[in-house]
Image (spheres, rainbow, N blue to C red):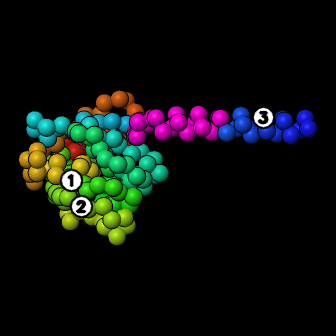
Amino acid sequence: MTILRIHRAACLALAGTVALLSSLAWAAPEGADMPLVRMDFGEHSVMAEVPVSSAQRIKGLGGRRALEPGRGMLFIFYGKPVTMCMRDMNFSLDFIWLNQGKVSQISPNVPPGGVKVSVRAKGDAQMVLEVPGGWVREHGVHLGQVVRIKPLDGKLPSTMTSKFNQEKQ
C-alpha cells in the first residue's frame, strides 16, 4: 500500500511539474529568445526577430496565429538565398527582399499553404523580411528603397552584424 501511495504522489508531482513548465513556455512571448533589430523604411519601422539557430530558421513564423502590428522576422543569407516556404503558416505574408541595403524585390500577400507555397528571390538578395500580408502596400514600400537596420538587444551574433555593415557599402 505504501508503494502505491509513493507512486501516486510521484505521478501527481510529475504532472504538476509538467503543467507548470508548459504554462511557463506558453506564457513566454514567441521569439523572446531571438535577437531583435529595428528596420527603418523611411518614416515606417518594423521590429524584427532574427532567427539564429537552424531550428528557429526552419520554424520561422510557422504556428503563430498572427504578428503584432509593426513586427516581422528577418532572415539573413550566407550565400545564395534559400527558398522560403509557408510551412505551418496561419496568415499571409509580404516578403521584402534586401540587397546592399535596399529593397530588391517584393513578394506581396504570399498565402499560407505549407511547403506547397514557396518563394525565392529572382535576383540577388542578402536578407528577406517577412511582415504581415498587405504591410508593403499599406506603408508604401517600393523597389530601391533604402532600409536602415539597427540591432536592439546585443544578442545578435557578430557574423550577422557584419552582414549589416556589408549592406551599407
For mark 1, what is the residue?
133
**Of residues 30 and 119, the one drawn nearer to the viewer in this rendering:** 30
Query: Nearer the observer, disc 2 or disc 3?
Result: 3
**Residue lying at 53% horizontally and 36% vertically, measured from the top left:** 23
Tell me the CA gap for discs 2 and 1: 7 Å
Tell me the CA gap for discs 1 and 3: 50 Å
For mark 3, what is the residue?
9
> In the image, what residue type sits under mark 3?
Ala
Magenta stretch secondary structure, dominant: helix
For mark 2, what is the residue?
110
Could you classify mark 2 by the number of other residues whose Cα lies within 10 Å: few (under 14), some (14-19), or many (20 or more)?
many
Tell me the CA gap for discs 2 and 3: 51 Å
Residue 38's image quarter? top left
- Image marks 1 and 3: residues in contact by CB distance under 8 Å: no
Residue 152's image quarter? top left
**Picture quarter with the N terminus:** top right
Note whether 103 is above or below 39 in the view shown. Answer: below
**Residue lying at 22% horizontally and 39% vertically, measured from the top left:** 70
Q: Is residue 43 visible?
A: yes
- Image marks 2 and 1: residues in contact by CB distance under 8 Å: yes
Instruction: Give coordinates of residue 132: x percent, y percent.
Output: 23, 49
Q: Secondary structure at mark 3?
A: helix
Residue 80's image quarter? bottom left
Query: Nearer the observer, disc 1 or disc 3?
Result: 3
Instruction: Give coordinates of residue 126: x percent, y percent.
Output: 26, 53
> In the image, what residue type sits under mark 2?
Val
